[in-house]
Image (cartoon, rainbow, N blue to C red):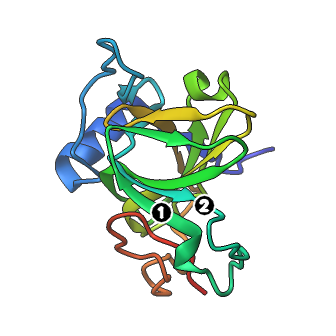
Amino acid sequence: MGNQPVMAILSDKWIRQQAQENGMIEPFVEAQRRDGCISYGLSSYGYDARVAPEFKIFTNVDSAVVDPKDFAANSFVDRETDVCVIPPNSFALARTVEYFRVPKDVLVICLGKSTYARCGIIVNVTPLEPGWEGHVTLEFSNTTPLPAKIYANEGACQFLFLKGNEPCETSYADRAGKYMGQRGVTLPRL
């Protein structure tokens, strides 16, 4: 590889500093919290975010077709609850409690929590691009033939922060991305 700069995964020390000095994660939880819940907060090389108590649960009541170019709002029912039950082989959208502000030289990727993965509940989040900010929309898939619970205000997924070899030429903010500054649970946009 020679003298090529290496993309590095950033440590708890860096994450804490960015959260405290630049508001990268708000509200910020200084250390892993476990006390009878699915853990959340700062970890060695990442941050475990919580799911807020706002959910959009997939429903087929109106026989809607899921079309990412023309998304029908009647495909979901809204629920504000501490425990969301996702029907078998179904899906729900939610959001993080935390609001993120991604630095221009960082890309953030997200992985699900093993507690949910071991129950057949998959959490998907697309990368948080350099310069993006907002509540992160979380996609929960219940891959099981049984109803599945999601616990609000508890850990949902872990964010990993990768520092680029140099600042990008065009950030998400520069190109005025369609999900910039999103608050609440955000549906697909074209």
Alpha carbon distance from label 1 to label 2: 7 Å
Residue 174 pos. (x, y %): 45, 84
Say above or below: 175 vs 20.
below
The residue sitting at the top extreme is 36
The residue sitting at the right extreme is 1
Say above or below: 63 vs 11.
below
- For disc 2, the marked residue is 59
- Count residues near mark 1 (Cα–Cα under 10 Å), then give few for <14, some for 14-19, many for 20+: some
Tell me if 42 is positioned left or right of 106 in this view.
left
- Count residues near mark 2 (Cα–Cα under 10 Å), then give few for <14, some for 14-19, many for 20+: some
Say above or below: 125 vs 184.
above
Secondary-structure class at tag 1: strand
Residue 136 picture quarter: bottom left
Q: Is the residue under label 2 in contact with that under label 1 (CB below 8 Å)?
A: yes
Residue 79 pos. (x, y %): 38, 54
Which residue is painted at 31% across and 36% down in the image? 153
- For disc 1, the marked residue is 77
Tell me if 28 is positioned left or right of 12 in this view.
left
Say above or below: 106 vs 104.
above
Which residue is painted at 44% across and 23% down in the image? 44
- Observer-nearest residue: 79 or 170? 79
Residue 190 pos. (x, y %): 61, 87
Residue 139 pos. (x, y %): 57, 53
Secondary-structure class at tag 2: loop
Tell me if 61 is positioned left or right of 1 in this view.
left
Residue 122 picture quarter: top right
